């Protein structure tokens, strides 16, 4: 049908006046869901994604920045890219701090200064974060016979992107901006299908192979040289509540995975249990009890237990 057959649409045509008024009343009164009933400014998902892309380019300029960089231009590129990214980040930190109980009573000037201090500390942490990420890439190269180069791993492996986002998000979480860290983690989840809570503690040389469907919970602790395959869950077995029935936040409820552990596709490991160092957990295993170092856990063993 020709669109010209329809009359021009507008507020009067749709009788929007009462609808707009009802929506305003819902926002401001009846169903006000703003933080503390007043906070309107939220961190921007799009800006934060740009920040992380900029920081990634500064950490690995020829992989995530510009492939035509040379020895004369690379430091300028890193400095300029970091300057832009950090200028954007400080505003996102400021907005996110409004959702932190410790910052609720700060003045605007105090909030801005705290955001700058956090961003400076975050920037100073970037060399250490890069060292961790290099160990992760090296673990992927050593652990996957299909990997032909570092460049392939960094450009083609979703696990590498997810871990990069996690290392940055975890730093923000430690610095007292958990809301912004969680937003960064969810951007990575959208990009890769891998869901890592930013509070999860993950040691160096961490490798997620294939990766789709991996879930790592808030209080999980992962040691060195750990490898996970797709659809692995490090989750909670139960959710403790207080006397009023409300969930207890932050209680340790996710697994501890010690050094040199391999967990194959589809394994589900639940609760505050320990997977001992050097263990191998087979595909599709459902594990809710601790296993000692050097264990080899398969479905057949679990059925016979």
Image: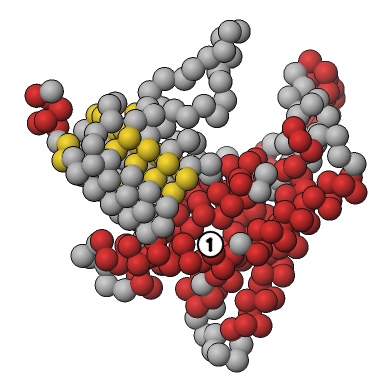
Tell me which residue sits at (48%, 67%) in the image: 131
211 sits to left or right of 175: left
The residue beneath circle 1 is 129
What SS does tag 1 mark?
A: helix
Tell me where residue 143 appears, x and y as whole percent: 25, 61
Residue 204 visible in the shown view: yes
Tell me where residue 255 appears, x and y as whole percent: 37, 34
Tell me where residue 75 appears, x and y as whole percent: 62, 82
Q: Quadrant of the N terminus?
A: top right
Residue 233 vertical position relative to residue 119 in the rendered view, above or below: above
Of 74 and 291, nearer the camera is 291
Tell me which residue sits at (11%, 30%) in the image: 301
Residue 161 vertical position relative to residue 241 in the rendered view, above or below: below
Residue 226 vertical position relative to residue 36 in the rendered view, above or below: below
- Quadrant of residue 288 in the image? top left
The residue sitting at the front extreme is 293
- Quadrant of residue 286 in the image? top left
Of 215 and 105, nearer the camera is 105
Its colouring scheme is secondary structure
Tell me which residue sits at (61%, 47%) in the image: 174
Tally of numbered tags: 1
The residue sitting at the top extreme is 244
The residue sitting at the bottom extreme is 72
Tell me where residue 48 appears, x and y as whole percent: 65, 53
Tell me which residue sits at (69%, 48%) in the image: 44
Of 108 and 188, nearer the camera is 108
Residue 56 visible in the shown view: no
């Amino acid at each position: 049908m020709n669109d010209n057959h329809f009359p021009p649409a507008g507020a009067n045509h749709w009788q929007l006046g009462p609808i707009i008024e009802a929506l305003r009343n819902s926002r401001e009164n009846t169903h006000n869901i703003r933080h503390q009933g007043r906070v309107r400014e939220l961190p921007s998902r799009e800006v934060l994604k740009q920040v992380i892309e900029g920081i990634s380019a500064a950490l690995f300029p020829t992989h995530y920045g510009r492939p035509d960089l040379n020895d004369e231009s690379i430091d300028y590129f890193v400095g300029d890219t970091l300057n832009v990214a950090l200028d954007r980040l400080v505003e996102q930190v400021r907005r996110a701090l409004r959702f932190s109980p410790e910052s609720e009573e700060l003045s605007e000037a105090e909030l801005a200064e705290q955001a700058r201090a956090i961003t400076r500390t975050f920037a100073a942490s970037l060399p250490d974060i890069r060292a961790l990420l290099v160990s992760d890439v090296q673990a992927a190269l050593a652990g996957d016979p299909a990997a032909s180069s570092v460049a392939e791993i960094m450009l083609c492996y979703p696990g590498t992107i997810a871990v990069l986002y996690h290392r940055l998000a975890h730093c923000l979480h430690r610095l007292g901006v958990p809301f912004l860290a969680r937003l960064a983690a969810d951007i990575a989840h959208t990009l890769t299908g891998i869901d890592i809570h930013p509070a999860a503690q993950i040691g160096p040389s961490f490798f997620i192979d294939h990766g789709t469907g991996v879930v790592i919970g808030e209080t999980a602790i992962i040691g060195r040289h750990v490898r996970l395959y797709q659809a692995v869950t490090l989750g909670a077995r139960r959710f403790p509540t207080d006397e009023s029935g409300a969930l207890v936040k932050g209680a340790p409820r996710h697994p501890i995975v010690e050094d040199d552990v391999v967990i194959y596709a589809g394994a589900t490991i639940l609760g505050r249990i320990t997977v001992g160092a050097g263990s191998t957990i087979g595909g599709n295993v459902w594990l809710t009890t601790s296993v000692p170092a050097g264990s080899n856990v398969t479905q057949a063993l679990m059925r016979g237990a």
